[in-house]
Amino acid sequence: MPDQIKGMVTNDQSPPEWKDVTTTVTLAAYETRVHVSAAAADYFITLPPMAECVGRGFYVIKRTVAAGGTFGAVVRSPEFDGVGRIYTSGELTALADFLILWTDGVRWYEIKELTT
């Protein structure tokens, strides 16, 4: 298995389940795949503490329903990183907007993003 894929699967080598999010939520460290599917309200998706996420691979958050009007979801960290900042994403408003995040336990990194 390629190195970049190893951290993306669970111990039994099956892909993680997708979590469907329709309102403000705080993710657990094992919730690494998230579908954003509410269309009628702004809300926040709070990432788990960075120290709990080290070695879990990439966190993928994808919009699966187009937002009505200007509503969207914002992903944020619950804590300051190593340089005193709190990670906050752009709004996920359009169908197929997405974020791919990774942490080294010190800060969150946007590996790839599409926010419109």
Image (spheres, rainbow, N blue to C red):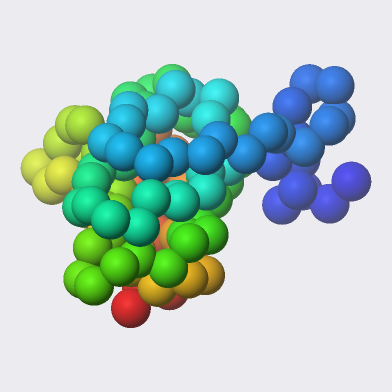
Please give left or right for residue 20 compared with residue 91 in the image.
Answer: right
Residue pushed farthest left? 84
Q: Nearer the viewer, residue 48 or 103?
A: 48
On the image, the x and y values in percent for residue 21 come to 44, 40
Residue in view at x 62 percent, y 39 percent: 18
Residue in view at x 42 percent, y 68 percent: 66
Residue in view at x 13 percent, y 47 percent: 85
Of the 4 image quadrants, the one containing the C terminus is bottom left
Q: Nearer the viewer, residue 37 or 114?
A: 37
Please give left or right for residue 43 compared with residue 21 in the image.
Answer: left
Count how many numbered circles sit on residues in the image. 0
Look at the picture and state if 103 lies above or below 73.
above
Is residue 29 in view? yes
Q: Residue 24's image quarter?
A: top left
Please give left or right for residue 13 compared with residue 72 in the image.
Answer: right
Q: Nearer the viewer, residue 20 or 32?
A: 20
Residue in view at x 85 percent, y 21 percent: 12
Q: Residue 73's image quarter?
A: bottom left
Please give left or right for residue 14 compared with residue 76 in the image.
Answer: right
Look at the picture and state if 16 lies above or below 83.
above
